[in-house]
Image (spheres, rainbow, N blue to C red):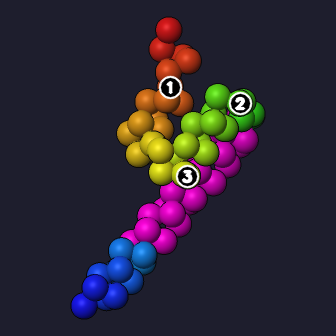
Amino acid sequence: MPSAVHSFTTLLDHQEHQLRQTHVEGWIAQQNAAGFGIDQHMTDALNAYLDGRFDLLALLTELRRPYLN
């Protein structure tokens, strides 16, 4: 039974990683299509999201942070 739980968790982790990768690729494509580049702050935030240090809400908040001040 524990191996089935571990397998299920691994599958969810893989699915989450795929979802995050799709979010990041889509966001970069939108930025490029709009004529904007990706600066170091954005790169750091996107990498933190891919690494699991940020959830989606934290990513969106961090990406907007420089423009809110």
In this picture, is 27 found above or below 18?
A: above
| Label 3 with label 1: CB-CB less than 8 Å | no
Asked whether, in this view, residue 35 is left or right of residue 25, the answer is right
Which structural element holds mark 1?
helix
Q: Amino acid at mark 2?
A: Gln
The segment highlighted magenta reads 12-34
Q: Is residue 37 visible?
A: yes
Q: Nearer the viewer, mark 1 or mark 2?
A: 2
In this view, the mark in front (3 or 1): 3
Residue pointed to by mark 2: 40
Task: Quickly name the residue at label 3.
Answer: 50
Identify which residue is drawn at 61% across, 45% down. Answer: 47
- Give the residue pinned by disc 1: 64
Please tell me whether residue 40 is drawn above or below residue 12 in the rendered image.
above
Give the percent coordinates (x, y) of residue 31. 66, 39
The residue lying toward the viewer, choosing from 18 and 32, is: 18
User: Of marks 3 and 1, which one's residue comes earlier in the chain?
Assistant: 3
**Left or right: residue 30 compared with residue 54:** right
Q: Which comes before the other along the chain, label 1 or label 2?
A: 2
